[in-house]
Amino acid sequence: MRFSLLFSIVLFFLIQNLNAQLSIAEQDQLAQLLTEKVNALRISKGKQPLERHIDLAKAAKLHSDYMAEKNQLTHNQIGTLYPNPSDRVFNFNKSFTTIGENALFQSWSRFPLSEKELEVLASNMYRSWRNSKGHYANMISGKFTFGDFGFAYNEKSKRLYATQVFAKKGYIVEGQLSNNAFGIQPQDISCDNIEGFHDNIIVNIGNAITIRYDEVILAHHDIETIKKIFVNPQDGIAVDLVQRDQLKCGEDNKLDASTIYDGVLLKPIYKDDLLASNTAQNPKRFITSLGKIPNVLLGKELSPNIVIIKDGKKCSYAVPTSIPSKRYNLRPIEPEILNPKIELKTEGVNGIHEVNFDFKSGQTSSTNSPEISIKQETIYGIDIKSFTSVDGSSESNEKLHKERANFIKAYIDNHFQTDAIPTTIEAKENWDLCFYHLEILGLDETLGKDKQKIKGYLQNNKSDNWKKALSLQRKSKAMIYTKGSWEKSDPYFLNYNLTDALLTKNYPLANRALAEMYYEDNINLFLNEEFIIENLFDKQELVQNVSALLLKNIEYYDLDNIVFFVRNWLSKPDLLSEKAQKNLLNLYTITAKRLLANWDTATEDFSKVLHPEKVEPLFKNYKTTNKTNPLFLNFHMASIEYYAQINFSPKIRVSFDFIADYFKKQSKSIKDDTDLGLFFNSWSMYPMTIESLMRRLHTKRLDEDSAFLLAKTYAAYKMDYHPNITLKINKQAILFNKERWCAWITKDFQNLRNEDIKDLYCTTCNKN
């Protein structure tokens, strides 16, 4: 429950002469006279009169006694169990909410009081409060339904201290799972200055909870923040489920009177269980279940709030709300194409036939007998590849792959006269594919290329990923290349030229074919993946055009192969031309963004991305002082995603500032400012969005999207809550699109906790 503490102090001096005390009867009569005057004012303002309540009178008397004892006008008590107005009220009655307090003292020394003197005293007190802005606001506030008074006299100073306490009777939500809020204690001063309790962090935690089916899930981006907040065994989280029906138009909000929760409180989860239940794939993230929805609430409109507990006390309360956000897309960069002036061919090598042989572990005879339907006269050449996985001993592996190669050679000889056919045999441990797998699994830096170290690692690692990788390393096959002729109109005209160029090592022809593929619509590399890796991806002369073709339709190709290509060549950039480097760097930013697009990126995918520091020197070639090169901007867009996965704040800040500064300078319209605000929000920089768009609000330069962005961001992140500003922002959004505003508040119904927004919603959206 959020309690509103509204209180004011006034000094009033009225000097009389006699020395005595105010009797109990006089105190009651004075309280009644003041109540009548305050209620007459409220009725004249269209407000309901206040009802007196003995527990509020006790709280008021308790505070007046304190002020009289200390001879000091204040709202705060030092060194007592009741430091603020709500503590004093709750000491006598915990069912009140929205508590306010007025206080004053008057110098008075004539006792006992006649009825006329009581009337004069009541009139003077009323007038003093009536003429004070803060007191007057409390006196006519529609937030309160109860009010009562307490008085105390300091004989030495001749001061009569008076306190009026205002309150609203709280609501009791049925269906609680505990009759004592699971033992959670109310907030006290020990909650102040707790490490990690920053406004944006609390907002983020509140917005990190969702309901999935019948379960409440917390998914936070930084497990270190969670560990920093939840340190002690009695630190934890509890979910408070608020129902839509608790905030109906035409009725008072029915938030529970408890000091701990507003709806139905789920059982809290404390530090040890909280951290032990993390299911995130990324070790930097935090995902856990905070509890299941009770059966009686299933199917109802619910919103899960979070009670943050420190040392068993409720120290913060977070209400989720939808905050629009969006990252910038990478800037489009046209690739550099190398297009040699060379004629394309209409005859040559145009067929690749892969004949696979399956060998069981340790066996030298294939378990299958593949069919081969190729004419002898069309064969250009044969490559026999016999590999063993690298996990066995090198001696036994050498024997295996040689005997398997001999088996394949004999099998091919039974089908063709191979004496006149160029044939190559490659029989070895498949270290090339193993090194590729190490890169894909992010182990290349850990294990390097020390073969004995890798073998030792594999002996102790039998994961499914490695079982699959080792199986792929044991592939043995024959590649049969065939020749023929083709027409220029053939849909595979360019692919045939590329195949011929690769097998004959005619790289100018290969580049010409790749260039024409880039310019042609709906043409991609159709070649066998292994053939691409072995004959296309590892050729220095082709990197520029291969990168360009991959950039043309990156979604078409296997991402792991692209990653291998990028990592391989970025590790040796000195071998490449400047234009090849540019295409490759462009490809790096795109693959990095794709791999890191998932908020909870698995370690396996994250490790595929080359560390930004390794490529930053290459990108710095595109850093200019007078105009930002789009490629350097894209580098920062990829870098910030990389560092966000590991929550490395210094580098995140560097890239954030660079991107923000770039788009600030580029901003020419309200749409540009809106996009910038969405970017700020995507990195939880809500004050920057508010500051930017508030300037436009004051100068009447908002449009519909920016008005809604400001309204939603301000609602979620109330740095300094100003009711008038809140209403102004929301009324501006309504002017642009009333239906959209009503739909938003209906969806994010906890905005109706704010009485001003509720009044606006119920009137504007015809919900009364």
Image (tube, rainbow, N blue to C red):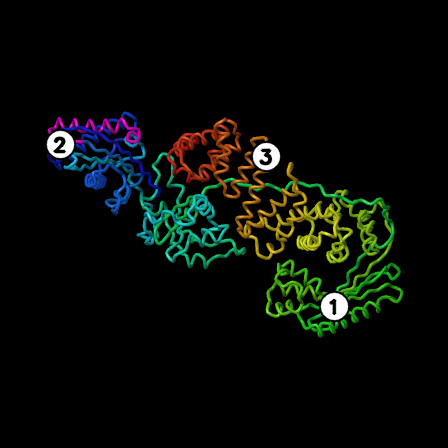
Q: Main secondary structure of the magenta part?
A: helix
User: In the picture provided, is 738 more to the left or to the right than 658?
Assistant: left
Identify the residue shown where x is 29% and y is 35%: 7
The residue at which mark 3 appears reads as 665
Foreground mark, 2 or 1, reads 2
Task: Give the magenta part as a residue range.
Answer: 107-136
Q: Secondary structure at mark 3?
A: helix
125 versus 256 height, above or below: above
- Earlier along the polypeptide chain: callout 1 or callout 3? 1
Residue 125 colored in magenta in the image: yes
Q: Nearer the viewer, residue 398 or 146?
A: 398
Contact between marks 3 and 2 (CB within 8 A): the answer is: no
User: In the picture provided, is 304 more to the left or to the right than 48?
Assistant: right
Identify the residue shown where x is 32% and y is 54%: 183
The residue at which mark 2 appears reads as 109
Identify the residue shown where x is 48% and y is 57%: 278
- Earlier along the polypeptide chain: callout 3 or callout 2? 2
Quadrant of the drawing holding the C terminus: top left
Q: Nearer the viewer, residue 349 or 299?
A: 349
Amino acid type of the residue that numbered disc 1 sits on in the rendered structure: Lys
The x and y percentages for residue 127 are 23, 26
Q: Distance of mark 3 from mark 2, alpha carbons?
A: 70 Å
Q: Nearer the viewer, residue 4 or 693?
A: 693
245 versus 233 height, above or below: above
Pointer 3 local density, CA inside 10 Å: few below 14, some 14–19, many at least 20: few
Foreground mark, 1 or 3, reads 3
Is residue 768 visible from the viewing direction of this image? no
The residue at which mark 1 appears reads as 428
Q: Secondary structure at mark 1?
A: strand
- Earlier along the polypeptide chain: callout 2 or callout 1? 2
